[in-house]
Image (cartoon, helix red, strand yellow):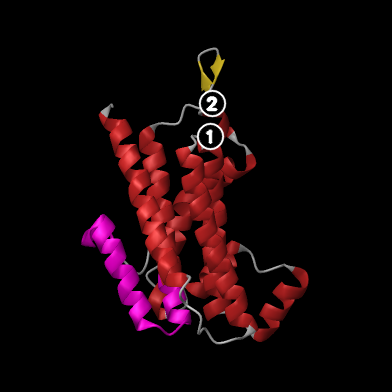
Amino acid sequence: MPEEEKLLTEAIRQSTTWLRGCRSLTDAQSDIKNSDRNRVAVSLFHLAMEHHSSILHLARTKHYGSAFALIRSQLEAYIRGVWIHRCATQKEIAHFLANNQPPKIEQLIINIESLPVFENGSLSRFKKKIWKISCDFNHGGYAQISWRLSGNKIVSDFGDEQIIMLLNIANTFTLQTVTELSVLAESEDMAQKVKAIHEEEFGSKHSSSVI
């Protein structure tokens, strides 16, 4: 097996083990306080993790274009969840539930980064870095097209390095998501366990509470 293929196989294994460990923590969480805010936020975080699971499945089955298209969905579910959990007023939550119209993602990030834990601006920098290409993948733009044209053939021509990068992004957002869930659940035990699982799989240099 070529070296790059081995690296991709290992990246898929790591991501699978990591997500399974996260689910073991979140599925066991049953004492979150009942409120519209918490129900909506938890639902969005659950959706973000489901997108990660789908990215993994698509990567295993080599449906790489569809896998890349989901990274924007994972990012948006996470950001909306954080905004609902930490920033939204009761009126804004009610409006979201009635009309399905949250503020634009730029405004959500501005609100989120007004909070001390996010004030370093890393979330907005990361969004700026990947947003254009993630929208391109999501809507069938040039990036999707260019990785399907090889000479006179139309094939999926994604490199292993790109797939590994995608998995690393999905892994990071799942770390952020479960960390945020631990805050919502007021569970320091959950926060410590998710950090330990992440360090065991990826090493301490990749562990961070902010992107």
- In the rendered view, would you say 52 is above or below 39? above
Residue that lies at the very extreme toward the top in this rendered image: 152
Question: Which residue appears at 53% of the width and 34% of the height?
Answer: 143
Circle 1: is it few (<14), some (14-19), or many (20+) Cα within 10 Å?
A: some
Of 185 and 83, the residue lying toward us: 185
Residue 23: percent from the left, percent from the top? 44, 65
Quadrant (top left, top right, bottom left, bottom right) of the N terminus: top left
Looking at this rendering, what residue extends furthest in the left direction? 204
Residue 148's disc number:
2
Q: Say which quadrant the C terminus sits in.
A: bottom left
| Magenta residue span | 179-206
Pair 1/2: label in front: 2
Would you place residue 201 above or below residue 142 in this image? below
Q: Residues within 10 Å of mark 2 (few under 14, many from 20)?
A: some
Q: Residue 27 versus residue 104: which sits nearer the camera? A: 27
At a point 46% along the width and 47% down the height, the residue shown is: 56
